[in-house]
Image (cartoon, rainbow, N blue to C red):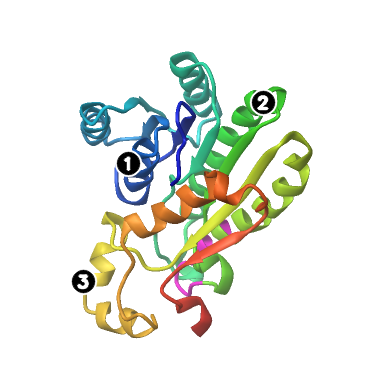
Amino acid sequence: MIRLDRQVALVTGGSRGIGRACCEFLARAGARVMVHYRLARDAAQGLAERIRAGGGDAEVCGADLARREQAEALVAATLGRFGALDILVNNAGIWKGAPLDAMEDGAWEEMLAVNLSGPFYVTRAAVRAMKPRRWGRIVNVSSTAGQRGEAGHSHYAATKGALIAWTKSLAVELAPFGILVNAVAPGWTDTDMARDALRGPEGARILETIPLRRAGRPEEIAGAVLFLVSDLATYITGEILNVNGGSVLCG
């Protein structure tokens, strides 16, 4: 039912986890996909080859999005390869823990650079391309941590909460230009980033906090992203779509 034929999508952090699933879902719906990676070039290339083998169109581009010039180059590469940019999924991010009194300046600065400055640099460049066409779809990947906090990960929660406020602000600012801005807020999801925690000593306790008693799958987050960029969601902007098995209700 959802078709994105010939639309161009840029997915940051697209080589694994939620980003990889987003790339696969968007390509399956007919979008041409730019798969961004920072370090996992082989994984990104393998994904692009898989998409092309299935009849889709995909390219890869590496960039450290915390560096403005590289973030802008990623958008430029997308426009150069596909000639347009219709959909931006800001998925790239990091998750690290540290108690506040032991948190180094560098850990705080890294979290803000990757989780906030990166999306800012990419989105600013993307909007400059979308505005003249008066059309665009932007989805930011936040977290339940941005809604209820996360002890021991306060810097991470701060960035994800900021993404929520930023999403709502941009939704109003960009609505006159036909650009819809929404966010998804995943809970615990079975990805490389969270796997050690989910399968470690605290795994059972974590699952007990989730009403559905399981972690989400990357594909379940990608489905929400696909919905928000589709023609089924043309009257939705500034929304934070929770995909967390009901866990935010327990916060």
Q: Say which residue appears at 67% left-offset and 25% top-offset.
A: 128
Examine the structure image and report whether residue 160 is included in the region drawn in magenta. no
In magenta, the rendered stretch is: 150-159
At which x and y percent is residue 130?
Answer: 64, 28
Judged left or right of residue 227, residue 190 is left
Q: Are marks 2 and 3 in contact (CB under 8 Å)?
A: no
Q: Name the residue under label 1.
A: 24
Residue type at mark 3 is Arg
Magenta residues, dominant SS class? helix
Quarter assignment of residue 44: top left
Q: Can residue 95 be seen in this view?
A: no
Give the mark nearest the N terminus, 2 or 1. 1
Q: Say which residue appears at 73% left-offset and 50% top-offset.
A: 169
CA distance for labels 1 and 3: 26 Å
Query: Within 10 Å of the Cα at label 2, are there few (<14), some (14-19), or many (20+) other Cα atoms?
Result: few
- Residue 199: mark in rendering: 3
Q: Is residue 138 visible?
A: yes
Residue type at mark 2 is Arg
Examine the structure image and report whether residue 157 is included in the region drawn in magenta. yes
Along the line of sight, the residue nearer the viewer: 44 or 182:
182
At which x and y percent is residue 205?
Answer: 31, 84
Residue type at mark 1 is Glu
Q: Say which residue appears at 31% left-offset and 28% top-offset.
A: 56
Judged left or right of residue 211, residue 70 is right
What residue occupies the far front of the structure in this picture?
1
Q: Mark 2 points at which residue?
A: 128
Give the mark nearest the N terminus, 2 or 3. 2
CA distance for labels 2 and 1: 26 Å
Q: In this view, does 176 lie above or below 32?
A: below
